[in-house]
Image (tube, grey):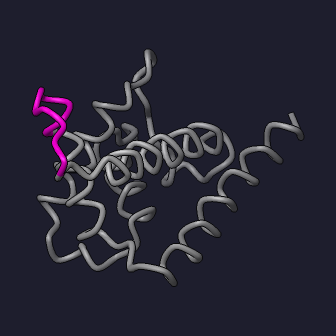
Amino acid sequence: MRVGISVALGLFGALVAGNIVAANAKKNDGNFLLSKCNATIRVMDGEKLSANTDELGIGQCFGLVEGVRNTLVYLNDFVESDLKICWPEEGIPNGQAVRILVKYLNEHPADLNDDQTLLTMMAFKKAYPCKT
């Protein structure tokens, strides 16, 4: 059990530290994330890769979404009830997670200057609230 907590906290710390380092190199806010994840959805929907396709950006979108989602799943049993996310029992595939994030970002344009990890967390919390 302690190993699980240590791993989860380590993953969370890595995400936060990665964002701090990346933010110094390039602003990784919701605007950046939305452009990368919109491109990801276009490719998921069948758009052909071209010379202009930002393949690195697609990888960044998938990687951030998967990393945040997995961290939240691991930490869910250890957070206060108002912070819990009630994930579907069967889980969600990465493609669906990207669509949830893009929907959230499009619905909250005033928040696009916020940190991309925070926005991803908020998108999942809104998509899968726990019934109280």
In-image side of 69 versus 31 (left or right): right
**Quarter containing the N terminus:** top right
Instruction: Name the residue: 44% across, 34% down.
Output: 86
Q: Quadrant of residue 98?
A: top left
**Residue that lies at the very extreme toward the right in this rendered image:** 2
**Quarter containing the C terminus:** top left
Residue 116 percent coordinates (x, y): 39, 65
Q: Quadrant of residue 97?
A: top left
In-image side of 48 versus 21 (left or right): left
* Residue 49 located within the stretch drawn in magenta: yes
Q: Is residue 60 above or below residue 40?
A: below
Magenta stretch: give its range: 42-51
Instruction: Name the residue: 64% across, 69% down.
Output: 17
**Residue that lies at the very extreme toward the top in this rendered image:** 90
> Nearest the camera: 82 or 128?
128
Instruction: Name the residue: 40% across, 39% down.
Output: 130
Residue 43 percent coordinates (x, y): 18, 35
Q: Is residue 28 above or below residue 58?
A: below
Report the predominant secondary structure element of the magenta stretch: loop
In-image side of 98 versus 104 (left or right): right
Residue 39 percent coordinates (x, y): 19, 48
* Residue 13 located within the stretch drawn in magenta: no
**Residue that lies at the very extreme toward the front in this rendered image:** 51
In-image side of 75 versus 19 (left or right): right
